[in-house]
Amino acid sequence: MSVTKTLPDMTRWQQYHALTKPKVVQLIVFCAFIGMVLAVPSLPTLAQLQRMAIACLGIWLVAGAAAAFNCLVEKTIDANMKRTAWRPTARGELSDWQALGFSAVLCGAGSLILYWWVNPLTMWLTFATFVGYAVIYTVVLKPLTPQNIVIGGASGAMPPVLGWAALTNSVSAEALLLFLIIFVWTPPHFWALSLYRVEDYRKAGLPMLPVTHGSEYTRLQILLYTVMLFGACVLPFAYGMSSWLYLAAAVVLSAGFFVYAWALNGAYSEALARKTFRFSLVHLSFLFLALLLDHYLF
């Protein structure tokens, strides 16, 4: 049974735009852009700025394609969840062929842009990320295992690697450190969301951790992951790719995430779970902003 809710009508353009999950894609492109900037030792040249802009466009298109394909595959699940019932595919406003065609066009256009105007390595890494999210995570992992977000988080952690490859045509240890931060950040971020959306996931038949193992176990895992995240976030400083400015930001932000997780582990409330989820977004955004500032100021 679909979730019944009065929702405003969208124009056709708005429907297609909604399929790309704009807010998620914005964060993806932002993290990729940080990877690009950090890959350049000094201020980028005009040619490098042009490459950054082209790479951001290509990555945005492929990321939007993956999001649209996800909406197509999960249209029935989305229709039964309050958080996603408004999506055009869930409401039947866009057909399967329209969503599939839109995804294919975006993926093809983005891949061609990356191949011809950036470099083949970035194109193949971005396409692999598309397959990892749209197929391996969405089709295989998400409906089968409560560890879906842990394993599938590898795709979500790829943006800074893509950005680094776009500017250097290589994947270095620095890029992998950025990958590690997002990879460890992803589970506590999504598990905080799934705590207060647990009934939606249960009705949809998805084996998210709060559904299969309960709230208490999930909250403990969130806490443990924030401890690991703290360690991952200080690695750029330990490796020598950032200075004290970044370290200070990393410590404060990671400590804040830990405090939220500690409080959530001690006593659950939906309001606190929501605050923890929102702070996780603040954590990652400001952490990467600190990397950017540190890169140019020190």
Image (tube, helix red, strand yellow):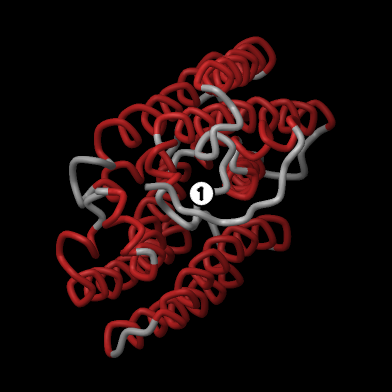
Q: Which residue is mark 1?
A: 85
247 left or right of 145 in image: right
Q: Nearer the viewer, residue 257 or 62?
A: 62
Q: Residue furthest left?
A: 213
Disc 1 marks which amino acid? Answer: Ala
> In which image quadrant can residue 156 be found?
top left
Give how far across and how far down residue 289 sits, in percent.
Answer: 64, 60
Characterize the local packing of mark 1: few (<14), some (14-19) or many (20 or more) Cα atoms within 10 angstroms.
many
Q: Secondary structure at mark 1?
A: loop
Measured along the vertical axis of the image, is residue 216 above or below residue 31?
below
277 left or right of 93 in image: left
| Image mark count | 1
Measured along the vertical axis of the image, is residue 176 above or below residue 279?
above
Q: Residue at x 55, y 76 (%)?
A: 248
Q: Nearer the viewer, residue 264 or 171?
A: 264
Give how far across and how far down residue 200 sits, in percent.
Answer: 36, 58
Give how far across and how far down residue 140 sits, in percent.
Answer: 25, 32
